[in-house]
Amino acid sequence: MLLDLPTAAKYNSWANKRLYAVAGKLSASELSQDRKGFFKSILGTLNHILLADLIYRERLEKKPTSFTRLDEILFTDFDGLQEAQFNQDTWYMAFCNDLDPEELEGTLSFDTVETGEYFSLPLRMCLTNLFQHQIHHRGQTHHMLSHAGLEPPPLDVVQFGSGL
């Protein structure tokens, strides 16, 4: 199922809410436990997802990035992290809904955070990359939740689509 960007943003929010609902059952120490993920823990991975959202938002708002590393821990408390993520999800849903389709063919230019590598790509590709990035890291979190003894939530697009 190929999603348009407003629907992709809605799916993204839906999937994040489902993932956070299960992750919220863990204690602070369980969330921070090194589970051998790319960003070590569930908390580290969820922080990275939020960080990428914030970096892309800065790019979209034509602001210089305020971040220097991709593994920064923005929130150590789960509730603060959840609130910040849900706020970003709401922002992206509004942004994608309000976006003029012609703007999607324009470019977004930026330097990467850690290496400073320069990219200038179609905005459509950048937003698609952002949502794909979240899917990738939600998958890692999903796996870590199962190793923490919890039943990870189904995050399939078809389940999301059946509720539309």
Image (cartoon, helix red, strand yellow):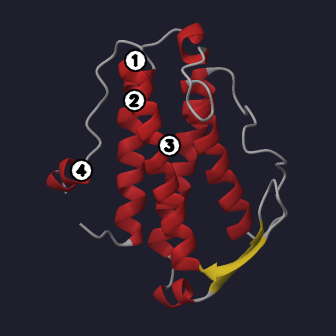
**Which residue is more in the foreground, 152 or 95?**
152
What residue would you read off at disc 1? 147
Q: Are marks 1 and 2 in contact (CB under 8 Å)?
A: yes
Furthest toward the front, the residue is: 36
What residue would you read off at disc 4? 160
Residue 149 point in image, percent of width and height = 35, 12
Mark 2 vs mark 4: which is more N-terminal? 2
Q: Residue, x 55% and y 30% (percent of image)? A: 37
**Which residue is more in the foreground, 80 or 126?**
126
Neighbour tally class for label 3: few under 14, some 14-19, many 20 plus, Cα within 10 Å: some
Q: Say which quarter of the image contains residue 145.
A: top left
Q: Residue, x 80% and y 68% (percent of image)? A: 117
Label 3 – label 2 distance at C-alpha: 10 Å
Q: Residue, x 38% and y 62% (percent of image)? A: 8
Label 3 – label 4 distance at C-alpha: 18 Å
What residue would you read off at disc 2? 143
Mark 3 vs mark 4: which is more N-terminal? 3
Q: Mark 1 is on which residue type?
A: His
Q: Are marks 1 and 4 in contact (CB under 8 Å)?
A: no
61 w.r.t. 42: above or below: below
Q: Mark 4 is on which residue type?
A: Phe
Neighbour tally class for label 2: few under 14, some 14-19, many 20 plus, Cα within 10 Å: some
Mark 3 vs mark 2: which is more N-terminal? 3
29 w.r.t. 98: above or below: above
What residue would you read off at disc 3? 137
Q: Mark 3 is on which residue type?
A: His
